[in-house]
Amino acid sequence: MEFLVHIEVLWPADGDPKELERLTAAERARARELSAEGRIRRLWRIPGRRANWGLWEAQDASTLHAAIRSLPFFPWLSVDVHPLAAHPSDPERPGGS
Amino acid sequence: MEFLVHIEVLWPADGDPKELERLTAAERARARELSAEGRIRRLWRIPGRRANWGLWEAQDASTLHAAIRSLPFFPWLSVDVHPLAAHPSDPERPGGS
Amino acid sequence: MEFLVHIEVLWPADGDPKELERLTAAERARARELSAEGRIRRLWRIPGRRANWGLWEAQDASTLHAAIRSLPFFPWLSVDVHPLAAHPSDPERPGGS
Amino acid sequence: MEFLVHIEVLWPADGDPKELERLTAAERARARELSAEGRIRRLWRIPGRRANWGLWEAQDASTLHAAIRSLPFFPWLSVDVHPLAAHPSDPERPGGS
Amino acid sequence: MEFLVHIEVLWPADGDPKELERLTAAERARARELSAEGRIRRLWRIPGRRANWGLWEAQDASTLHAAIRSLPFFPWLSVDVHPLAAHPSDPERPGGS
Amino acid sequence: MEFLVHIEVLWPADGDPKELERLTAAERARARELSAEGRIRRLWRIPGRRANWGLWEAQDASTLHAAIRSLPFFPWLSVDVHPLAAHPSDPERPGGS
Amino acid sequence: MEFLVHIEVLWPADGDPKELERLTAAERARARELSAEGRIRRLWRIPGRRANWGLWEAQDASTLHAAIRSLPFFPWLSVDVHPLAAHPSDPERPGGS
Amino acid sequence: MEFLVHIEVLWPADGDPKELERLTAAERARARELSAEGRIRRLWRIPGRRANWGLWEAQDASTLHAAIRSLPFFPWLSVDVHPLAAHPSDPERPGGS
Amino acid sequence: MEFLVHIEVLWPADGDPKELERLTAAERARARELSAEGRIRRLWRIPGRRANWGLWEAQDASTLHAAIRSLPFFPWLSVDVHPLAAHPSDPERPGGS
Amino acid sequence: MEFLVHIEVLWPADGDPKELERLTAAERARARELSAEGRIRRLWRIPGRRANWGLWEAQDASTLHAAIRSLPFFPWLSVDVHPLAAHPSDPERPGGS
């Protein structure tokens, strides 16, 4: 099942730059793993913000939660999950009737 | 450039079922064309609603507008467009640095 | 997978009372079927409104959408779906760690 | 009477991890007690968030408040309570007419 | 248990004045009955609007729903119910500790 | 004139418990005085929150403001005031025509 | 007591122009009377909208409601009332301390 | 003085296409006049919507209102006006200090 | 041109009382000057809040911004500006036609 | 492609004035460069706020993001980007048909 996930990073403006750098590197490494596992399918920056839209895949919301929670930035994230259903006109995975 | 597009179909509950059927068929045909042109990349139903999330691609907002406006359901649509920027951790089209 | 579903019935105040009666009976019959199939687990009225909160179960959002769409009142419904993940302290189906 | 309760935990990202661990353990113990007393009927994680939806039962809002206030995390919680009325099509506790 | 109830009357501007007059009279008669039964404790107009705040009393949300639904204007009402808990400093019914 | 007042106490989760205890005691004492003066008529806890709904009475908004400002918790309060008009069906103080 | 009142006129785009003209004339006549009585102190158009902000004066919310309800456009109005308290730095009616 | 103006056209989906065509032509003619007068400086479509953002110029809000009200589509418009102040870093009309 | 200005003072509950006293005195002195210059026409407290509604006058938004920015509390203010147009029924400065 | 960008500067009221001065100067220098590159076309202060509306130009959202992120104030900014499409009645760059 696919999920559309909106993530906002609430990193404080006066946060430690070293820590931010370390977390950013760890986040990218973890994102690569989640991509390799097929958990993250697509990822886009929201222009002007420390935020992203992502297309995630998981068998259910519990598995998705575990994946999101594994992100090094998790304590600073505000996350909204939108469940997605198949659309008959989806070019990639046409479903429905 | 990719855009995340949220579309809600405001078809009235007492609308003519024949007209709805006709428009639905026309909409699917037009969606197929837009997919073939690479305008619509992905399309998902929002569960429980006459609404969808779509991943669209267009060189700019003017081209995107023309594509959305070509949908047979356009007069009944409420559309929100979210511009997307490249994310360095996007598995499919990695960008940025 | 469980989903928390909020449904508001937008029946017009000047709607035909006969039609409302007929739809209400059909809705209850369909709800009984969905309960028997294990699709609807719990259902509550929101006091003062033509609205309800429901606990639904489906393998994914596509199956859930098909079930909601099968409700006779579907054209008059405004539906919001909240995906649910397992909680380690859930008394009935404890999950997580 | 049943209540649908939405709880968001506003634990600061830079909070003391030891204290968080201690509170989490205490919260689970208290949740077990509230489940045993029939106060908490169901509990679900909201995917991606430190938040949950819960189905609580209490004779009135005062008893419910006392139960929520007894949670060790109470000072960090943002809580919204939705009162629930019986629905004639509820599979578990059918009510109404 | 007491409830704070916000009611907005969505009567159309071009509604039949005769029908409005008939409903208003019926509403007042029903409100008198609900007051006599101790269901409605207080009622206030929201200045400038066809709306009111009311203090209602009922043993639970199901009984409250039945009372609100018995109002002749019910099909035109938009209702929000706020459950109330006892406050130790309430001058009339001091509760808690 | 009566006012419906919504008060949320924004006390920080890591606030000094001694200070909280002292303020709570002072708040109750002040609430008793305001009740004795007929300023506070009713007071209810909002279940699950450090918040209350209150029915206040004052000749005008200036007098009401002075009363609210006299609360020891005032610097931590977020307050919303709803002016109330007489309703012909109010059981306690019937007004209008 | 002064009130800040926001009024939006929800006149339908396809409403009868004759009726609109008649109501507009009646509204102006009634506004003149309310001004003469000291009920309306100031009135401003909100640019681009069929809406206005007004400074009204009345001894309480009940009197204000009666005045607003006397407007010929009342059935088409959406009204929000903001109660105003004296400010020590008000140039015209300095109050407080 | 410059204003940023957001205009949404609430034309009904089942509106008369002839009337829509006529109004669209009249709107363009009027927009040309307002541009020639220096009232409308820039105009952009909001992609996917019957809506636009415009940069308008007028000596005050009254003059702006008269200009907006002169649009043939005015009865169908929902308009929000944002007043603009000079910014010292504005490339075109640098102001401030 | 007149503007309706909503100002909320976001002074922290644990702010230095001496500083608050000093700023309050400076704010009143500056408000007196702005009143003498005809910049502030009216000022009202919003009951229950550290907030006010004000009627300001300035030739344009740039002049208004300079005046608001001159307030000693400016760094703690959240300000919303509503531009006002003349209304033909305004008792004090009737405009329009 | 043009974008309408809303920027709010969340600089803390108790921030270091020296740092604020330094950042403001750096911000202006960077804004001049972005203007010279044709990235920033127009810039307006929002009266009463540390905020601005800007008209930006970039070939896509990724280029726009890089430009916004280069602002010295970026860690303190809350940014909303509105994509703009050509409007046939735009006086400066008329497009469409």
Image: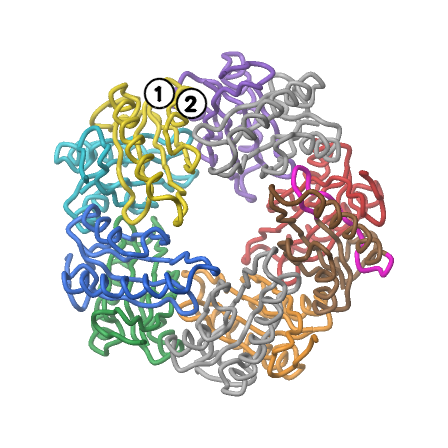
Chain colours: A orange, C brown, D red, F purple, G yellow, H blue, I cyan, J green
Picture quadrant where residue J97 is located = bottom left
Name the chain letter of the residue that bears numbered label 1.
Answer: G
Q: Is residue G67 above or below residue D6?
A: above
Where residue D5 appears, as percent x and y from the top left, is: 68, 45
User: Is J97 included in the stretch rendered in magenta?
Assistant: no
Magenta residue span: C36-52
Indicate the amino acid at tag 2: Ala
Single out the residue that lies furthest toward the left: I37
Label 1: state its secondary structure: loop
Q: Secondary structure at mark 2?
A: helix
Q: Position of residue I2 (x, y in %)?
A: 21, 40
Q: Are marks 1 and 2 in contact (CB under 8 Å)?
A: yes
Q: Is residue H13 left or right of residue C95?
A: left
Residue G97 in sight in this render: no
Is residue J71 toward the left or the right of residue C84 in the image? left
Q: Is residue C40 magenta?
A: yes
Which residue has dot 2 on it? G61
Total label count?
Answer: 2
- Dot 1 corresponds to which residue? G58
